[in-house]
Image: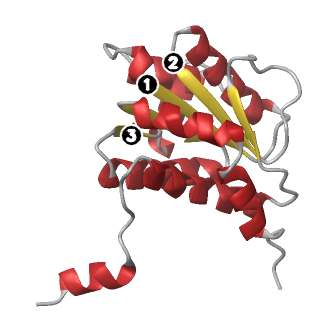
Amino acid sequence: MLNIEQFDSKFKGLASSPEFKQLQKLYNDATHVFFFGHGGNMAIAEHAAIDAARLTDKNVLAPGGVLCTSIQSDTNFNDWLMHWLDISTRGLDKSKCLAIGISCSTTGKSSDCLSTALNWASYNGINSCLWAAQAKEGGINDEVLQIIQNAKYYHTSELLSLALTYELIDGAGHKCPTISKKAKERRF
């Protein structure tokens, strides 16, 4: 059987941590939320953004693959997420924005591009948070809130990140629909 590292207890511990409670307040106060990740977490970020946008009253965005390759060709791999955030927050009150970077690996170029974007966000007055499987050593501004999952496997970290998205939605007073309720709405 697949090892998901005692998912339930990990999730409950993260959701009740002081760091997550701080993030929940930032999320509740935010008007604009920006999720981004790399590798498989790019898909997690996009899924999180789509559900948060449709289930809350917030403007929630995540970059997609086409945008990623386009911006990378205009800039470079390290700076593309920072550039995307810069473009996405133009004209917005940055004090009403929240940037959430999602990562399983905390070393290497793809992790560094998340740090660059989160550091840029905090430097420009945007509250920012890193969700990571393991603690990132160096390269991240002390003002970036970190929620460390202490996960051994990529899949556990990715599952936790998506679950934390729904916890934020619920904690902001919005409800995630049940499957049975959606099914009843579709029936005549």
Q: Nearer the viewer, mark 3 or mark 1?
A: 1
- What element does badge 3 sit on? strand
Instruction: Tell me which label, 3 or 1, sits earlier in the chain.
Output: 3
Q: Is residue 180 left or right of residue 28?
A: left
Residue nearest the viewer, comparing 167 with 73 = 167
Instruction: Tell me which label, 2 or 1, sits earlier in the chain.
Output: 1
Q: Is residue 167 left or right of residue 29?
A: right
Quarter in which the N terminus is drawn: bottom right
Residue nearest the viewer, comparing 101 with 178 = 178
Q: Residues within 10 Å of mark 2 (few under 14, many from 20)?
A: many
CA gap between label 2 and label 1 equals: 6 Å
Furthest residue toward bottom: 188
Quarter in which the C terminus is drawn: bottom left
Residue matched to label 3: 60
Whole-percent x, y for residue 15 in the image: 65, 52
Disc 1 residue type (three-letter): Cys
Residue matched to label 1: 97
Instruction: Tell me which label, 3 or 2, sits earlier in the chain.
Output: 3
Disc 2 residue type (three-letter): Ile
The residue at the point 40 percent across, 50 percent down is: 52
- What element does badge 1 sit on? strand
The answer to whether 71 is drawn above or below residue 66 in the figure is: above
Disc 3 residue type (three-letter): Val
Disc number for residue 126:
2
Whole-percent x, y for residue 172 in the image: 42, 46
Q: Residues within 10 Å of mark 3 (few under 14, many from 20)?
A: many
The answer to whether 15 is drawn above or below residue 23 in the figure is: below
